[in-house]
Image (cartoon, rainbow, N blue to C red):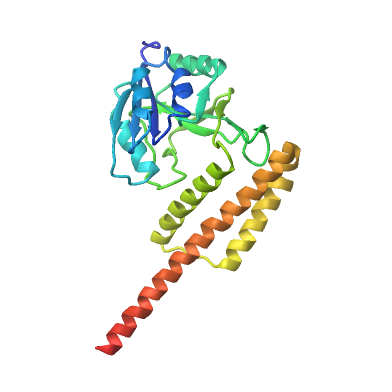
Amino acid sequence: MIHDGHTVTALVITKNEETHLSECLASVIGWVDEVVVLDSGSTDRTKEIAEQYGARFYQNLEWQGFGRQRQIAQDYVTSSWCFWLDADERVTSALRDEILSVLRQGTANNVYAIPRLNWFFGRFIRHCGWYPKPVVRLYPLALTHYDDANVHEQVEIRDSFCVKTLVNDLMHYPYKDLRHYVTKSASYANDWAKMKDAEGKKSSLVGAFFRAVLRFFRMYLFQKGMLDGKQGFLLCVLSSYYTFLKYAELWILGQDKEKEIRNRHLQERQK
């Protein structure tokens, strides 16, 4: 399918996404030119579902972080434009039409951000700093790619780029239940802490506590989380927990380093 000379590939990175992948791919099949799915070792029906929808399915089992995984996935693209999706996201018909319009008139240095509307335990969240919070997901293949971040990766934006924000929302269903949220947050916190530790950053438990408290009040009061009802309150509490977890993990890594240094000095004195 050619959109006035521009072709587009939808890209998804996966691991055990059988719950979400079918609806995600169904929302792009028929109007994108190809779908690329890069998997990191699924043991469920992810591969089968991807192939049912005609996606080009690849695997990279040497996990180097989300940023690097997205870079590898982009290497498989043969279209002129990249459109990124997570498996738990859905494209509405309005967003589809807007993207097709962009492809008909997109210029060489334009990249496009899309607002995400998040479903959180029975309600779409429109405050808490979660909305609209546009994310860059649509750009020409030759123009850019994701950075190397292990977690919270972002598309690299140069000064010469013109970032335009689309009007219609990308629907996001990030959590199946509370256990899923806690497990996912713990994994992200660990990846974040390792990344910051490698950069030489440090933390303290007191600092972690105060950052968590500030996170709650910023989201609930200043970002009007109270307008999202009970779900908004829960999200603010869980977000403050995630903040504490990140900096506590970073503190623990610092303690491990200090222990290694002490042991090394002790061994040297004993020689």
In which quadrant is the N terminus drawn?
top left
Whether residue 253 is visible, yes or no, is yes
Q: Quadrant of residue 71?
A: top left
Q: Position of residue 138 (x, y in %)?
A: 44, 27
Q: Position of residue 62 (x, y in %)?
A: 28, 44
Identity of the residue drawn at 53% across and 60% down: 247
In terms of depth relative to the viewer, which is nearer, 161 or 120? 120
Identity of the residue drawn at 57% across and 54% down: 243
In which quadrant is the C terminus drawn?
bottom left
Q: Quadrant of residue 212?
A: bottom right
Q: Position of residue 184 (x, y in %)?
A: 50, 45
Identity of the residue drawn at 42% across and 12% down: 30
Left or right: 262 in relation to 101: left
Compared to residue 6, the image places residue 150 above or below, namely below
Whether residue 80 is visible, yes or no, is no
Left or right: 209 in relation to 56: right
Q: Position of residue 191 (x, y in %)?
A: 43, 52
In terms of depth relative to the viewer, which is nearer, 221 or 57? 57
Residue found farthest to the bottom: 270
Compared to residue 172, the image places residue 178 above or below, namely below
Left or right: 58 in relation to 156: left
Compared to residue 202, the image places residue 30 above or below, namely above
